[in-house]
Image: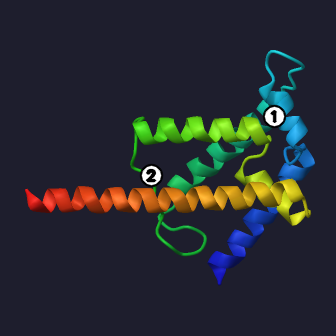
Amino acid sequence: MKKILFALIGGLVFGVGLILAGMANPAKVLGFLDIAGKWDPSLAFVMGGAVAVGLVGFRLAQSQALAWTGEPRVWPTLKGLDKRLVGGALLFGVGWGIAGICPGPALVLLGAGSGKALVFVVAMVVGMAVHAVVTSGHSASSASGKAAK
């Protein structure tokens, strides 16, 4: 129950923060991405503020063996860049630039009844499903190839 409560509180804080900062507005995001035109740097300040708060939070969390939910902390182990990370970042950036929406704000907009967000979220879920199918087939074929050796 604690886990669900913290997820609810975190989601509410994140959503309200996105709305207050104007980051659920695709026009504002596209203004940030338009560096050759009428560039709007406000998203950079929102990101900088989020990173600063996150750094403090992560520093505090590193000193705790357990999360507030009572579960052990699990930290990422990947330290470098790989093709999947770079490829995913490129695809994410293209989608962000086309729509002016990324996943967090898309869910906020969906909750506000935006039709564009509905299309975006459906397309995002389809993309995730396609990825799952492609990578599960790839993993199975590479695993069977290793077993045959």
Q: How many neighbours does mark 2 have within 10 angstroms: few (below 14), some (14-19), or many (20 or more)? A: few
Q: Which mark is on residue 84?
A: none
Compared across the picture, whether 36 is left or right of 79 comes to right
Task: State the separation of the CA atoms marked 2 and 1.
Answer: 26 Å
Height in image: 21 above or below 7? above
Q: How many neighbours does mark 1 have within 10 angstroms: few (below 14), some (14-19), or many (20 or more)? A: some
Compared across the picture, whether 138 is left or right of 49 comes to left
The amino acid pointed to by label 2 is Pro
The amino acid pointed to by label 1 is Leu
Closer to the chain start, of discs 2 and 1, is 1
**Quadrant in which the N terminus appears:** bottom right
Q: Where in the figure is residue 36, as x and y percent of width and height?
A: 80, 15
Query: Residue placed at 55% from the left, 67% from the top?
Result: 67
Total numbered labels: 2
In the picture of the structure, the residue carrying the numbered disc 1 is 43
In the picture of the structure, the residue carrying the numbered disc 2 is 76
